């Protein structure tokens, strides 16, 4: 059997890869020493802010006229007789309080997803060459990567959930403006806003907890993550 030749990489390409690795390791150093601790503190402060604790101002007014209750004459009208049309409503604004919360939450979700991708790339570059024996450190790396993948999947669902709220609230507002005599549609709009307020707060709680988890698990297992075999060996890549 012919022996497979090793990949032939030009010195220029190899230098670019090495430069990328060095920049990656430098970014990770900054991430765990500065960015993540500051992010935990910032998220904690945000959760204590009135915007995420005061539920009293979540209910936004709906500029939809309420029709007059039917009179006795209207109830006895003949079927073919033209009935009075329901009052029309004009421009209906979104809930500014919820919009302000989402403007704070969405960038935090995106920032966390970038952090998770960066940590994943870093650990992949630290995986040693595949060989027999002494794989406990590699198992730790794989466990951390599995956890990051699960967290990424959860965070990937948050932005579509926000878009779903906007769509469902829009549908509820449309129904409330069309069926002005049905009060349940108005209540549904307010319930959608209240649910999104609680969801926004839970998202920040999750992000704070996940940043803390990242920092803690990597800090406790730094030796095994950075040197899984317990000796200086080149990574798998």
Image: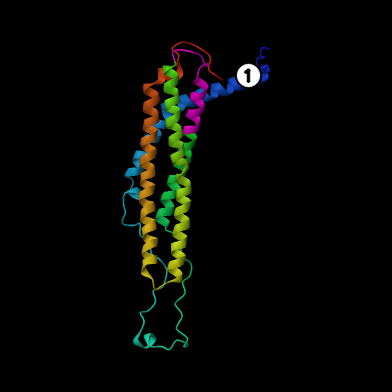
Residue closest to the eye, 28 or 4: 4
The colour scheme of the drawn protein is rainbow
Left of 187 or right of it: where is 27? right
> Would you place residue 125 above or below residue 79 in this image?
above
Percent coordinates x, y for residue 126 in the rendering:
50, 20
Percent coordinates x, y for residue 178 in the rendering:
46, 71
- Residue labelled with disc 1: 15
| Residue 15: in magenta span | no
Residue closest to the eye, 232 or 34: 232
- Asked which quadrant contains residue 217, the reply is top left
- Quadrant in which the N terminus is drawn: top right
Left of 50 or right of it: where is 116? right
Tell me if I can see residue 42 in this picture: no
Residue drawn at 48 percent across, 13 percent down: 132
The residues colored magenta run 116-134
Q: What secondary structure is marked by label 1?
A: helix
Residue drawn at 51 percent across, 24 percent down: 124
Residue drawn at 59 percent across, 19 percent down: 18
Residue closest to the eye, 120 or 29: 120
Percent coordinates x, y for residue 171 in the rendering:
46, 62
- Quadrant in which the C terminus is drawn: top right
> Would you place residue 204 above or below residue 176 in this image?
above
| Residue 131: in magenta span | yes
Tell me if I can see residue 147 in this picture: yes
């Amino acid at each position: 059997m012919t022996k497979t030749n090793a990949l032939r990489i030009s010195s220029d390409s190899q230098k670019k890869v090495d430069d990328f690795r060095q920049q990656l390791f430098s970014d990770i150093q900054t991430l765990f020493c500065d960015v993540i601790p500051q992010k935990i503190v910032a998220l904690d402060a945000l959760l204590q802010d009135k915007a995420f604790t005061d539920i009293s101002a979540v209910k936004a007014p709906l500029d939809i006229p309420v029709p007059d209750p039917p009179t006795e004459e209207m109830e006895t009208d003949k079927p073919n007789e033209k009935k009075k049309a329901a009052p029309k409503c004009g421009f209906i604004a979104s809930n500014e309080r919820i919009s302000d919360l989402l403007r704070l939450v969405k960038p935090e979700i995106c920032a966390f997803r970038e952090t998770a991708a960066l940590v994943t790339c870093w650990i992949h570059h630290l995986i040693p060459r595949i060989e027999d024996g002494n794989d406990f450190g590699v198992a730790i790396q794989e466990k951390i990567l599995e956890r990051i993948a699960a967290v990424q999947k959860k965070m990937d669902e948050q932005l579509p959930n926000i878009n779903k709220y906007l769509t469902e609230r829009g549908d509820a507002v449309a129904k409330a403006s069309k069926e002005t005599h049905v009060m349940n549609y108005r209540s549904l709009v307010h319930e959608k806003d209240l649910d999104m307020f609680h969801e926004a707060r839970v998202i920040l709680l999750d992000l704070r907890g996940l940043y803390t988890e990242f920092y803690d698990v990597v800090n406790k297992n730094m030796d095994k993550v950075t040197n899984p075999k317990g000796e200086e060996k080149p990574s798998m890549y």
